[in-house]
Image: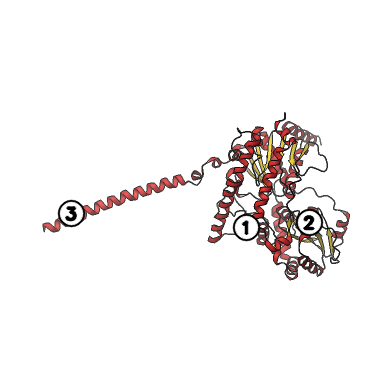
Amino acid sequence: MRSQVFVLCVCVGLCVVECGNILAILPFIGKSHFFSYEPILAALARRGHDVTVVSKFPRTSPLKGYTDIDVRNPETTEVKINLTKIEIFGILGEEVMEKIEEFLIDFESVFKRDDFQRLLHGNVSFDLVITEVFVSDMFNGVAYKFNAPLVGIISSTVLPWANDRFGIPDNPSYIRSTFYPGVGEMTFYDRILNTFALMISKVFYDYYISSRDEVISKRYLGSDTPPVKDIVKNTSLLLTNSHFSLNQARPFPPNVIEISGAHLKQLKPLPQDIQNFLDESKDGVVYFSLGTVVDTSSMSELKRRAFCDSFAKLKQRVLWKWELGDMPDKPANVKTVKWMPQAEVLAHPNVRVFIGHGGLLGTIESVSNGVPMIGIPVFGDQHQNIETLVNFGTAVALDFAKIDEYSLTKALNAVLFDSKYKTNAKLLSDRFNDRPLPPIDTATFWIEYVMRHRGAHHLRPSGVHLPWYQYFLLDVILLLLLFVIVVVYFTSLFVKRIYKLIFTKDKIKLKTK
Protein backbone atom coordinates (compact mmCIF):
# COMPACT_ATOMS: atom_id res chain seq x y z
CA MET A 1 0.00 0.00 0.00
CA ARG A 2 2.82 2.39 0.92
CA SER A 3 4.60 1.67 -2.35
CA GLN A 4 1.42 2.48 -4.29
CA VAL A 5 1.06 5.79 -2.45
CA PHE A 6 4.73 6.55 -3.16
CA VAL A 7 4.32 5.86 -6.88
CA LEU A 8 1.19 8.03 -6.96
CA CYS A 9 3.02 10.88 -5.24
CA VAL A 10 5.94 10.62 -7.66
CA CYS A 11 3.55 10.70 -10.64
CA VAL A 12 1.74 13.74 -9.24
CA GLY A 13 5.07 15.40 -8.55
CA LEU A 14 6.28 14.78 -12.09
CA CYS A 15 3.04 16.22 -13.47
CA VAL A 16 3.41 19.37 -11.36
CA VAL A 17 6.99 19.83 -12.56
CA GLU A 18 6.17 19.25 -16.22
CA CYS A 19 2.81 20.98 -16.47
CA GLY A 20 2.74 23.76 -19.02
CA ASN A 21 0.70 26.51 -20.60
CA ILE A 22 -1.01 25.27 -23.78
CA LEU A 23 -2.84 27.29 -26.43
CA ALA A 24 -5.22 25.40 -28.75
CA ILE A 25 -6.57 27.41 -31.71
CA LEU A 26 -9.48 25.42 -33.17
CA PRO A 27 -12.04 27.87 -34.61
CA PHE A 28 -13.56 25.61 -37.29
CA ILE A 29 -17.35 25.53 -37.05
CA GLY A 30 -17.75 21.77 -37.50
CA LYS A 31 -18.93 20.15 -34.26
CA SER A 32 -17.55 16.73 -35.09
CA HIS A 33 -14.09 18.23 -35.63
CA PHE A 34 -13.96 19.97 -32.28
CA PHE A 35 -15.57 17.11 -30.36
CA SER A 36 -12.81 14.80 -31.56
CA TYR A 37 -10.25 17.17 -29.97
CA GLU A 38 -12.05 18.31 -26.82
CA PRO A 39 -11.48 15.11 -24.79
CA ILE A 40 -7.71 15.46 -25.36
CA LEU A 41 -7.73 19.10 -24.26
CA ALA A 42 -9.83 18.24 -21.20
CA ALA A 43 -7.46 15.37 -20.34
CA LEU A 44 -4.50 17.77 -20.49
CA ALA A 45 -6.30 20.16 -18.13
CA ARG A 46 -7.04 17.32 -15.72
CA ARG A 47 -3.33 16.46 -15.75
CA GLY A 48 -2.59 19.91 -14.39
CA HIS A 49 -1.83 21.86 -17.56
CA ASP A 50 -3.31 25.30 -18.20
CA VAL A 51 -5.18 24.93 -21.48
CA THR A 52 -6.56 27.96 -23.33
CA VAL A 53 -8.94 26.93 -26.11
CA VAL A 54 -9.99 29.24 -28.94
CA SER A 55 -13.13 27.68 -30.43
CA LYS A 56 -16.83 28.05 -31.16
CA PHE A 57 -17.76 25.40 -28.60
CA PRO A 58 -17.12 26.58 -25.04
CA ARG A 59 -17.59 24.07 -22.26
CA THR A 60 -21.00 23.88 -20.64
CA SER A 61 -19.46 22.96 -17.29
CA PRO A 62 -16.28 24.51 -15.85
CA LEU A 63 -13.06 22.52 -15.65
CA LYS A 64 -10.05 23.63 -13.64
CA GLY A 65 -7.20 24.65 -15.92
CA TYR A 66 -9.43 24.85 -19.01
CA THR A 67 -10.11 28.39 -20.30
CA ASP A 68 -12.39 29.12 -23.26
CA ILE A 69 -12.10 31.99 -25.71
CA ASP A 70 -15.46 31.87 -27.47
CA VAL A 71 -15.12 33.00 -31.10
CA ARG A 72 -18.61 32.21 -32.33
CA ASN A 73 -19.51 34.39 -35.31
CA PRO A 74 -23.22 35.12 -35.95
CA GLU A 75 -22.43 35.63 -39.65
CA THR A 76 -21.08 32.09 -40.01
CA THR A 77 -23.64 29.32 -40.10
CA GLU A 78 -22.98 25.75 -39.12
CA VAL A 79 -22.44 23.37 -42.02
CA LYS A 80 -25.72 21.58 -42.79
CA ILE A 81 -26.46 19.20 -45.65
CA ASN A 82 -29.96 19.21 -47.15
CA LEU A 83 -30.83 15.66 -48.21
CA THR A 84 -33.51 16.67 -50.71
CA LYS A 85 -30.98 18.88 -52.49
CA ILE A 86 -28.37 16.10 -52.41
CA GLU A 87 -30.89 13.66 -53.88
CA ILE A 88 -31.52 15.95 -56.86
CA PHE A 89 -28.21 17.70 -57.50
CA GLY A 90 -25.56 15.88 -55.48
CA ILE A 91 -22.65 17.82 -53.96
CA LEU A 92 -21.74 20.67 -56.33
CA GLY A 93 -18.14 21.83 -56.65
CA GLU A 94 -19.15 25.49 -56.52
CA GLU A 95 -20.84 24.92 -53.16
CA VAL A 96 -17.65 23.38 -51.79
CA MET A 97 -15.66 26.42 -52.98
CA GLU A 98 -18.19 28.78 -51.42
CA LYS A 99 -17.88 26.97 -48.10
CA ILE A 100 -14.08 27.07 -48.17
CA GLU A 101 -14.24 30.80 -48.87
CA GLU A 102 -16.65 31.22 -45.97
CA PHE A 103 -14.31 29.28 -43.66
CA LEU A 104 -11.32 31.46 -44.60
CA ILE A 105 -13.27 34.67 -44.00
CA ASP A 106 -14.47 33.29 -40.67
CA PHE A 107 -10.93 32.36 -39.62
CA GLU A 108 -9.68 35.85 -40.43
CA SER A 109 -12.48 37.32 -38.30
CA VAL A 110 -10.90 35.58 -35.28
CA PHE A 111 -7.78 37.75 -35.68
CA LYS A 112 -9.99 40.87 -35.60
CA ARG A 113 -11.56 40.03 -32.25
CA ASP A 114 -10.48 42.09 -29.24
CA ASP A 115 -10.18 39.04 -26.98
CA PHE A 116 -7.89 37.27 -29.45
CA GLN A 117 -5.80 40.41 -29.94
CA ARG A 118 -5.42 40.73 -26.16
CA LEU A 119 -4.23 37.15 -26.10
CA LEU A 120 -1.64 37.82 -28.82
CA HIS A 121 -0.31 41.05 -27.33
CA GLY A 122 -0.83 40.40 -23.63
CA ASN A 123 1.78 39.56 -21.04
CA VAL A 124 1.46 35.81 -21.45
CA SER A 125 3.62 33.01 -22.83
CA PHE A 126 2.81 29.51 -23.99
CA ASP A 127 4.80 26.29 -23.89
CA LEU A 128 2.89 24.72 -26.77
CA VAL A 129 0.47 25.72 -29.53
CA ILE A 130 -2.02 23.26 -31.06
CA THR A 131 -3.71 23.98 -34.40
CA GLU A 132 -5.94 22.00 -36.73
CA VAL A 133 -4.49 20.71 -40.00
CA PHE A 134 -7.50 21.19 -42.25
CA VAL A 135 -8.35 24.04 -44.64
CA SER A 136 -6.03 26.77 -43.38
CA ASP A 137 -2.64 27.33 -41.75
CA MET A 138 -3.05 31.01 -40.95
CA PHE A 139 -2.93 30.42 -37.18
CA ASN A 140 0.36 28.51 -37.22
CA GLY A 141 2.29 31.78 -37.09
CA VAL A 142 1.02 32.24 -33.52
CA ALA A 143 3.45 29.50 -32.47
CA TYR A 144 6.30 31.53 -33.97
CA LYS A 145 5.10 34.66 -32.16
CA PHE A 146 5.18 32.87 -28.79
CA ASN A 147 8.36 30.94 -29.68
CA ALA A 148 6.48 27.76 -28.78
CA PRO A 149 6.55 24.27 -30.32
CA LEU A 150 3.68 23.59 -32.72
CA VAL A 151 1.55 20.44 -32.73
CA GLY A 152 -0.94 19.72 -35.51
CA ILE A 153 -4.11 17.73 -34.99
CA ILE A 154 -6.56 16.41 -37.55
CA SER A 155 -10.04 14.90 -37.16
CA SER A 156 -9.65 12.64 -40.21
CA THR A 157 -6.95 10.63 -41.88
CA VAL A 158 -3.99 12.63 -43.18
CA LEU A 159 -4.94 15.09 -45.93
CA PRO A 160 -2.73 15.27 -49.06
CA TRP A 161 -1.28 18.73 -48.35
CA ALA A 162 -0.10 17.59 -44.90
CA ASN A 163 2.11 14.83 -46.29
CA ASP A 164 5.00 16.99 -47.45
CA ARG A 165 5.27 19.10 -44.32
CA PHE A 166 5.58 16.05 -42.05
CA GLY A 167 7.67 13.93 -44.39
CA ILE A 168 4.92 11.36 -44.89
CA PRO A 169 5.40 9.12 -47.93
CA ASP A 170 2.40 9.42 -50.26
CA ASN A 171 3.39 7.31 -53.26
CA PRO A 172 0.18 7.22 -55.35
CA SER A 173 1.06 3.80 -56.75
CA TYR A 174 -0.29 2.18 -53.58
CA ILE A 175 -1.40 4.92 -51.14
CA ARG A 176 -4.88 6.20 -51.95
CA SER A 177 -5.55 9.90 -51.79
CA THR A 178 -8.35 11.05 -49.49
CA PHE A 179 -10.06 12.36 -52.61
CA TYR A 180 -9.94 9.10 -54.55
CA PRO A 181 -11.84 6.58 -52.41
CA GLY A 182 -11.50 2.87 -52.78
CA VAL A 183 -9.91 -0.18 -51.20
CA GLY A 184 -7.47 -2.87 -52.21
CA GLU A 185 -4.84 -2.84 -54.93
CA MET A 186 -5.27 -0.24 -57.65
CA THR A 187 -5.48 -0.94 -61.36
CA PHE A 188 -3.47 1.10 -63.87
CA TYR A 189 -6.53 3.31 -64.41
CA ASP A 190 -6.93 3.74 -60.63
CA ARG A 191 -3.30 4.80 -60.30
CA ILE A 192 -3.73 7.43 -63.00
CA LEU A 193 -6.79 8.94 -61.30
CA ASN A 194 -5.24 8.62 -57.84
CA THR A 195 -2.12 10.47 -59.02
CA PHE A 196 -4.22 13.28 -60.50
CA ALA A 197 -6.34 13.51 -57.32
CA LEU A 198 -3.19 13.81 -55.21
CA MET A 199 -1.54 16.40 -57.44
CA ILE A 200 -4.64 18.54 -57.98
CA SER A 201 -5.47 18.71 -54.25
CA LYS A 202 -1.90 19.76 -53.41
CA VAL A 203 -1.74 22.39 -56.14
CA PHE A 204 -5.15 23.77 -55.13
CA TYR A 205 -4.11 24.05 -51.49
CA ASP A 206 -0.74 25.64 -52.28
CA TYR A 207 -1.99 28.24 -54.74
CA TYR A 208 -5.46 29.02 -53.42
CA ILE A 209 -5.35 28.54 -49.65
CA SER A 210 -1.68 28.92 -48.70
CA SER A 211 -1.38 32.18 -50.62
CA ARG A 212 -4.34 33.58 -48.66
CA ASP A 213 -2.90 32.30 -45.39
CA GLU A 214 0.38 34.07 -46.13
CA VAL A 215 -1.27 37.47 -46.58
CA ILE A 216 -3.49 37.15 -43.48
CA SER A 217 -0.66 35.82 -41.30
CA LYS A 218 1.62 38.77 -42.07
CA ARG A 219 -1.26 41.25 -41.76
CA TYR A 220 -2.08 40.31 -38.17
CA LEU A 221 1.15 38.75 -36.85
CA GLY A 222 3.65 41.15 -38.41
CA SER A 223 5.59 41.43 -41.64
CA ASP A 224 8.60 39.76 -40.01
CA THR A 225 6.61 36.52 -39.56
CA PRO A 226 8.28 33.75 -41.60
CA PRO A 227 6.42 32.32 -44.59
CA VAL A 228 3.59 30.00 -43.59
CA LYS A 229 5.15 27.19 -45.65
CA ASP A 230 8.29 27.38 -43.52
CA ILE A 231 6.38 27.50 -40.24
CA VAL A 232 4.29 24.42 -41.00
CA LYS A 233 7.41 22.45 -41.88
CA ASN A 234 8.67 23.15 -38.36
CA THR A 235 5.62 21.51 -36.77
CA SER A 236 6.90 19.07 -34.16
CA LEU A 237 4.11 16.50 -34.24
CA LEU A 238 0.91 15.48 -36.01
CA LEU A 239 -1.90 13.64 -34.21
CA THR A 240 -4.08 11.93 -36.79
CA ASN A 241 -7.50 10.37 -36.29
CA SER A 242 -6.55 7.12 -38.02
CA HIS A 243 -5.52 3.58 -37.08
CA PHE A 244 -3.87 0.91 -39.19
CA SER A 245 -6.57 -1.63 -38.34
CA LEU A 246 -9.29 0.57 -39.82
CA ASN A 247 -7.58 2.76 -42.40
CA GLN A 248 -5.11 1.67 -45.04
CA ALA A 249 -1.73 0.53 -43.74
CA ARG A 250 0.87 3.10 -44.78
CA PRO A 251 4.29 4.24 -43.57
CA PHE A 252 4.40 7.09 -41.05
CA PRO A 253 7.54 8.79 -39.70
CA PRO A 254 7.90 9.04 -35.90
CA ASN A 255 6.45 12.58 -35.84
CA VAL A 256 3.02 11.25 -36.89
CA ILE A 257 0.96 9.52 -34.19
CA GLU A 258 -2.30 7.64 -34.82
CA ILE A 259 -4.89 8.34 -32.10
CA SER A 260 -8.13 7.09 -33.65
CA GLY A 261 -10.69 6.66 -30.88
CA ALA A 262 -9.29 9.38 -28.60
CA HIS A 263 -12.71 11.05 -28.60
CA LEU A 264 -14.31 8.00 -26.95
CA LYS A 265 -15.01 9.02 -23.38
CA GLN A 266 -16.11 7.01 -20.38
CA LEU A 267 -19.73 6.11 -21.02
CA LYS A 268 -22.43 8.08 -19.22
CA PRO A 269 -25.95 6.89 -18.36
CA LEU A 270 -28.44 7.14 -21.20
CA PRO A 271 -31.59 9.25 -20.85
CA GLN A 272 -34.13 7.03 -19.11
CA ASP A 273 -36.60 6.88 -22.00
CA ILE A 274 -33.88 5.73 -24.41
CA GLN A 275 -32.48 3.29 -21.86
CA ASN A 276 -35.92 1.71 -21.40
CA PHE A 277 -36.51 1.57 -25.16
CA LEU A 278 -33.23 -0.28 -25.70
CA ASP A 279 -33.55 -2.57 -22.67
CA GLU A 280 -37.05 -3.70 -23.65
CA SER A 281 -36.11 -4.48 -27.28
CA LYS A 282 -35.87 -8.27 -27.08
CA ASP A 283 -35.31 -8.66 -30.83
CA GLY A 284 -32.70 -5.93 -30.99
CA VAL A 285 -32.55 -2.34 -32.19
CA VAL A 286 -31.69 -0.62 -35.47
CA TYR A 287 -30.05 2.75 -34.78
CA PHE A 288 -30.45 5.40 -37.52
CA SER A 289 -28.52 8.68 -37.46
CA LEU A 290 -26.75 10.74 -40.12
CA GLY A 291 -24.70 12.80 -37.69
CA THR A 292 -24.66 16.50 -36.86
CA VAL A 293 -24.05 17.86 -40.37
CA VAL A 294 -26.67 15.91 -42.31
CA ASP A 295 -30.23 16.79 -41.30
CA THR A 296 -32.37 13.65 -41.69
CA SER A 297 -35.55 15.69 -41.44
CA SER A 298 -34.55 17.47 -44.68
CA MET A 299 -35.16 14.34 -46.78
CA SER A 300 -38.04 14.34 -49.24
CA GLU A 301 -41.42 12.92 -48.22
CA LEU A 302 -40.98 10.09 -50.74
CA LYS A 303 -37.68 9.10 -49.15
CA ARG A 304 -39.03 9.41 -45.60
CA ARG A 305 -41.93 7.17 -46.55
CA ALA A 306 -39.52 4.56 -47.92
CA PHE A 307 -37.65 4.46 -44.60
CA CYS A 308 -40.88 4.25 -42.60
CA ASP A 309 -42.34 1.45 -44.74
CA SER A 310 -39.13 -0.54 -44.53
CA PHE A 311 -38.84 -0.10 -40.76
CA ALA A 312 -42.49 -1.12 -40.29
CA LYS A 313 -41.66 -4.59 -41.66
CA LEU A 314 -39.07 -5.26 -38.95
CA LYS A 315 -39.71 -7.07 -35.70
CA GLN A 316 -36.75 -5.11 -34.32
CA ARG A 317 -37.23 -1.66 -32.86
CA VAL A 318 -35.77 1.42 -34.57
CA LEU A 319 -34.18 4.38 -32.80
CA TRP A 320 -34.17 7.29 -35.27
CA LYS A 321 -32.40 10.64 -34.83
CA TRP A 322 -35.03 12.97 -36.28
CA GLU A 323 -34.24 16.66 -35.81
CA LEU A 324 -37.92 17.68 -35.67
CA GLY A 325 -38.45 15.46 -32.64
CA ASP A 326 -41.80 13.78 -33.10
CA MET A 327 -43.01 12.10 -36.30
CA PRO A 328 -46.80 11.66 -36.07
CA ASP A 329 -47.15 8.88 -38.65
CA LYS A 330 -44.08 6.87 -37.69
CA PRO A 331 -44.41 3.06 -37.39
CA ALA A 332 -45.21 1.61 -33.97
CA ASN A 333 -41.71 0.12 -33.58
CA VAL A 334 -39.93 3.44 -34.25
CA LYS A 335 -38.83 5.99 -31.65
CA THR A 336 -37.67 9.39 -32.91
CA VAL A 337 -35.40 11.64 -30.85
CA LYS A 338 -33.92 15.07 -31.68
CA TRP A 339 -30.54 14.17 -30.21
CA MET A 340 -29.02 11.25 -28.36
CA PRO A 341 -25.57 10.27 -27.07
CA GLN A 342 -24.42 8.11 -29.96
CA ALA A 343 -21.46 6.41 -28.28
CA GLU A 344 -23.65 5.26 -25.39
CA VAL A 345 -26.37 4.03 -27.77
CA LEU A 346 -23.91 2.01 -29.86
CA ALA A 347 -22.41 0.50 -26.71
CA HIS A 348 -25.79 -1.00 -25.72
CA PRO A 349 -25.78 -4.78 -26.31
CA ASN A 350 -29.22 -4.73 -27.98
CA VAL A 351 -28.12 -2.48 -30.86
CA ARG A 352 -27.67 -4.78 -33.85
CA VAL A 353 -27.30 -2.40 -36.81
CA PHE A 354 -26.18 1.20 -37.23
CA ILE A 355 -27.53 3.07 -40.26
CA GLY A 356 -25.16 6.02 -40.69
CA HIS A 357 -23.52 8.29 -43.24
CA GLY A 358 -20.00 7.06 -42.60
CA GLY A 359 -18.60 10.08 -40.79
CA LEU A 360 -15.29 9.10 -39.24
CA LEU A 361 -16.32 9.57 -35.60
CA GLY A 362 -19.49 7.51 -36.01
CA THR A 363 -17.55 4.88 -37.95
CA ILE A 364 -14.99 4.65 -35.15
CA GLU A 365 -17.75 4.30 -32.54
CA SER A 366 -19.40 1.57 -34.59
CA VAL A 367 -16.11 -0.30 -35.06
CA SER A 368 -15.10 0.07 -31.42
CA ASN A 369 -18.38 -1.50 -30.29
CA GLY A 370 -18.47 -4.18 -32.98
CA VAL A 371 -21.76 -2.98 -34.52
CA PRO A 372 -22.31 -3.72 -38.26
CA MET A 373 -23.35 -0.80 -40.46
CA ILE A 374 -25.55 0.15 -43.36
CA GLY A 375 -23.62 3.06 -44.82
CA ILE A 376 -25.25 5.94 -46.70
CA PRO A 377 -22.27 8.18 -47.56
CA VAL A 378 -23.09 11.74 -48.57
CA PHE A 379 -19.83 13.68 -48.98
CA GLY A 380 -16.14 13.93 -48.12
CA ASP A 381 -14.33 10.95 -46.63
CA GLN A 382 -17.61 9.14 -45.91
CA HIS A 383 -17.42 7.19 -49.17
CA GLN A 384 -13.92 5.96 -48.30
CA ASN A 385 -14.95 5.04 -44.75
CA ILE A 386 -17.93 2.98 -45.89
CA GLU A 387 -16.00 1.30 -48.72
CA THR A 388 -13.42 0.25 -46.15
CA LEU A 389 -16.07 -1.35 -43.92
CA VAL A 390 -17.69 -3.06 -46.91
CA ASN A 391 -14.27 -4.50 -47.77
CA PHE A 392 -13.93 -5.79 -44.20
CA GLY A 393 -17.35 -7.44 -44.50
CA THR A 394 -18.91 -5.38 -41.70
CA ALA A 395 -21.19 -3.11 -43.74
CA VAL A 396 -23.50 -2.73 -46.72
CA ALA A 397 -23.38 0.49 -48.76
CA LEU A 398 -26.42 2.30 -50.18
CA ASP A 399 -26.66 5.33 -52.46
CA PHE A 400 -29.04 7.82 -50.83
CA ALA A 401 -30.41 9.03 -54.18
CA LYS A 402 -31.37 5.46 -55.11
CA ILE A 403 -32.71 4.24 -51.77
CA ASP A 404 -36.24 2.85 -51.84
CA GLU A 405 -38.19 0.52 -49.59
CA TYR A 406 -36.91 -2.58 -51.41
CA SER A 407 -33.19 -1.73 -51.33
CA LEU A 408 -33.29 -0.67 -47.68
CA THR A 409 -35.22 -3.79 -46.61
CA LYS A 410 -32.77 -5.97 -48.52
CA ALA A 411 -29.81 -4.33 -46.79
CA LEU A 412 -31.44 -4.61 -43.36
CA ASN A 413 -32.21 -8.29 -43.83
CA ALA A 414 -28.64 -8.96 -44.94
CA VAL A 415 -26.98 -7.27 -41.97
CA LEU A 416 -29.53 -8.44 -39.39
CA PHE A 417 -29.71 -12.09 -40.38
CA ASP A 418 -26.37 -12.94 -42.02
CA SER A 419 -24.06 -13.73 -39.10
CA LYS A 420 -20.92 -12.90 -41.09
CA TYR A 421 -21.48 -9.16 -40.59
CA LYS A 422 -21.54 -9.41 -36.80
CA THR A 423 -18.63 -11.87 -36.78
CA ASN A 424 -16.50 -9.60 -38.96
CA ALA A 425 -17.49 -6.54 -36.91
CA LYS A 426 -16.32 -8.30 -33.74
CA LEU A 427 -12.98 -9.24 -35.35
CA LEU A 428 -12.43 -5.67 -36.55
CA SER A 429 -13.37 -4.32 -33.12
CA ASP A 430 -10.82 -6.59 -31.44
CA ARG A 431 -8.05 -5.40 -33.78
CA PHE A 432 -9.02 -1.75 -33.34
CA ASN A 433 -9.12 -1.89 -29.53
CA ASP A 434 -5.95 -3.98 -29.10
CA ARG A 435 -3.37 -1.30 -28.17
CA PRO A 436 -0.59 -0.79 -25.63
CA LEU A 437 -2.25 2.43 -24.41
CA PRO A 438 -5.72 3.96 -24.74
CA PRO A 439 -5.64 6.49 -27.61
CA ILE A 440 -6.29 9.48 -25.35
CA ASP A 441 -3.29 8.51 -23.19
CA THR A 442 -1.21 8.14 -26.34
CA ALA A 443 -2.23 11.66 -27.40
CA THR A 444 -1.47 13.27 -24.03
CA PHE A 445 1.86 11.44 -23.74
CA TRP A 446 3.13 12.75 -27.07
CA ILE A 447 1.89 16.30 -26.46
CA GLU A 448 3.73 16.30 -23.14
CA TYR A 449 6.75 14.73 -24.86
CA VAL A 450 6.95 17.75 -27.18
CA MET A 451 6.74 20.11 -24.20
CA ARG A 452 9.35 18.20 -22.19
CA HIS A 453 11.85 18.45 -25.04
CA ARG A 454 10.85 21.99 -26.07
CA GLY A 455 9.91 20.71 -29.50
CA ALA A 456 10.49 17.39 -31.19
CA HIS A 457 12.30 18.23 -34.39
CA HIS A 458 14.46 15.14 -33.91
CA LEU A 459 11.37 13.12 -34.90
CA ARG A 460 11.04 14.90 -38.23
CA PRO A 461 12.53 13.30 -41.38
CA SER A 462 15.17 15.45 -43.07
CA GLY A 463 13.29 15.05 -46.35
CA VAL A 464 10.81 17.71 -45.20
CA HIS A 465 13.24 20.47 -46.19
CA LEU A 466 14.47 18.93 -49.45
CA PRO A 467 13.46 20.57 -52.75
CA TRP A 468 11.07 18.34 -54.68
CA TYR A 469 13.64 17.45 -57.33
CA GLN A 470 16.03 16.22 -54.62
CA TYR A 471 13.29 14.39 -52.72
CA PHE A 472 12.42 12.39 -55.84
CA LEU A 473 16.13 11.98 -56.73
CA LEU A 474 15.59 13.72 -60.06
CA ASP A 475 19.03 15.34 -59.85
CA VAL A 476 20.65 11.94 -59.24
CA ILE A 477 18.58 10.29 -61.98
CA LEU A 478 19.52 13.12 -64.36
CA LEU A 479 23.21 12.64 -63.56
CA LEU A 480 22.94 8.88 -64.09
CA LEU A 481 21.12 9.42 -67.39
CA LEU A 482 23.79 11.89 -68.44
CA PHE A 483 26.48 9.39 -67.50
CA VAL A 484 24.74 6.63 -69.48
CA ILE A 485 24.33 8.95 -72.48
CA VAL A 486 28.02 9.93 -72.36
CA VAL A 487 29.12 6.29 -72.06
CA VAL A 488 26.83 5.23 -74.91
CA TYR A 489 28.00 8.16 -77.02
CA PHE A 490 31.71 7.48 -76.60
CA THR A 491 31.19 3.74 -76.89
CA SER A 492 29.39 4.25 -80.19
CA LEU A 493 32.21 6.53 -81.39
CA PHE A 494 34.75 3.90 -80.40
CA VAL A 495 32.81 1.12 -82.14
CA LYS A 496 32.41 3.24 -85.27
CA ARG A 497 36.14 4.05 -85.27
CA ILE A 498 37.11 0.40 -84.92
CA TYR A 499 34.61 -0.60 -87.58
CA LYS A 500 35.90 2.09 -89.91
CA LEU A 501 39.51 1.05 -89.38
CA ILE A 502 38.73 -2.61 -90.04
CA PHE A 503 36.55 -1.85 -93.04
CA THR A 504 39.14 0.56 -94.53
CA LYS A 505 41.94 -1.98 -94.02
CA ASP A 506 39.96 -4.67 -95.84
CA LYS A 507 39.31 -2.28 -98.71
CA ILE A 508 43.03 -1.51 -99.08
CA LYS A 509 43.85 -5.23 -99.16
CA LEU A 510 41.31 -5.84 -101.91
CA LYS A 511 42.66 -2.97 -104.02
CA THR A 512 46.25 -4.26 -103.60
CA LYS A 513 45.24 -7.69 -104.85
Q: How far apart are marks 3 and 2 (CA)?
A: 92 Å
Q: Mark 1 points at which residue?
A: 181
Which quarter shows the N terminus? top right
| Residue 243 visible to the viewer | no
Question: Which of disc 2 and disc 3 is earlier in sequence?
Answer: 2
Q: What residue type is labelled 3?
A: Lys
Packing grade of label 3 (10 A; few <14, some 14-19, many >=20) is few
Q: What is the secondary structure assignment of the residue under circle 3?
A: helix
Between 108 and 358, which is closer to the camera in this rendering?
108
- Near mark 1 (Cα within 10 A), the count class, few <14, some 14-19 or many ≥20, is some
Question: What residue is disc 2 on?
Answer: 346
Q: Which one is in front in this view, the residue at disc 3 or the one at disc 1?
A: 1
**Label 3 to label 1: alpha-carbon separation:** 69 Å
Give amino acid for label 2. Leu
| Eye-nearest disc, 1 or 2 | 1
Please count the marks in the image: 3
Name the outermost residue toward the left. Answer: 513
Q: Are marks 1 and 2 in contact (CB under 8 Å)?
A: no
Q: Name the residue under label 3.
A: 505
Mark nearer the N terminus (1 vs 2): 1
